[in-house]
Image: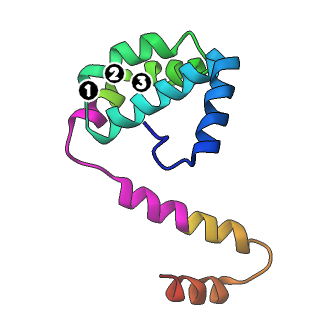
Amino acid sequence: MGRDHLCQADAIQVARIEASLPALATARRLTDRFTDMVRNAREEALEEWLNEAEDGLLGAFARGLRRDQAAVAAALREPWSNGQTEGQINRLKTLKRQMYGRANIDLLKARLVQAP
């Protein structure tokens, strides 16, 4: 997964890096599997993934997911998502942080109205 878009020279370079750093290659494979699991809502693969990831470079991330495994499993299982809402909140907070101390509320309102 993920190497189809690379030119031959880049693919060779990635292969060399992964050959010299097996832990990094394992982390890349686990990352690809996690991405597939989330995109395809494969809740049944979560436990196995967590067990494999906890011992490597993704250990801290896996332990964080394990602490709230019920919520992660529900996110994979349920069809609902609050991604759009969270994205809008993140955008508004980013705008607020960018303008904090440099502008007043009128400029913030003007910027939000013109934002796509």
Q: Nearer the viewer, mark 3 or mark 2?
A: 2
Q: Secondary structure at mark 1?
A: helix
In front: 25, or 40?
A: 25
Which quadrant is home to the N terminus? top left
Q: Are marks 3 and 1 in contact (CB under 8 Å)?
A: no
Residue placed furthest toward the front: 8
- Type of the residue with mark 2: Leu
Residue type at the position of mark 1: Glu
Specify whether 115 is left or right of 46: right
Which residue has dot 1 on it? 43
- Whether 69 is drawn above or below 86: the answer is above
Decide: is 26 above or below 84: above
Residues in magenta?
74-91
* Image disc number at residue 62: none
Point out the frontmost of discs 3 and 1. 1
- Vertical arrangement, residue 37 with respect to residue 89, above or below: above
**Residue wearing tag 2:** 46
The reply, left or right, for residue 31 in relation to residue 12 is left
Q: Nearer the viewer, residue 12 or 62?
A: 12
Q: Is the Cβ of the residue at disc 1 closer than 8 Å to that at disc 2?
A: yes
Q: CA distance from mark 3 to mark 1?
A: 14 Å
Q: State the residue at coordinates (22%, 33%).
A: 77
- Asked which secondary structure carries label 3, the reply is loop
The label number, if any, that marks residue 68 in the structure image: 3
**Three-letter residue code for mark 3:** Asp
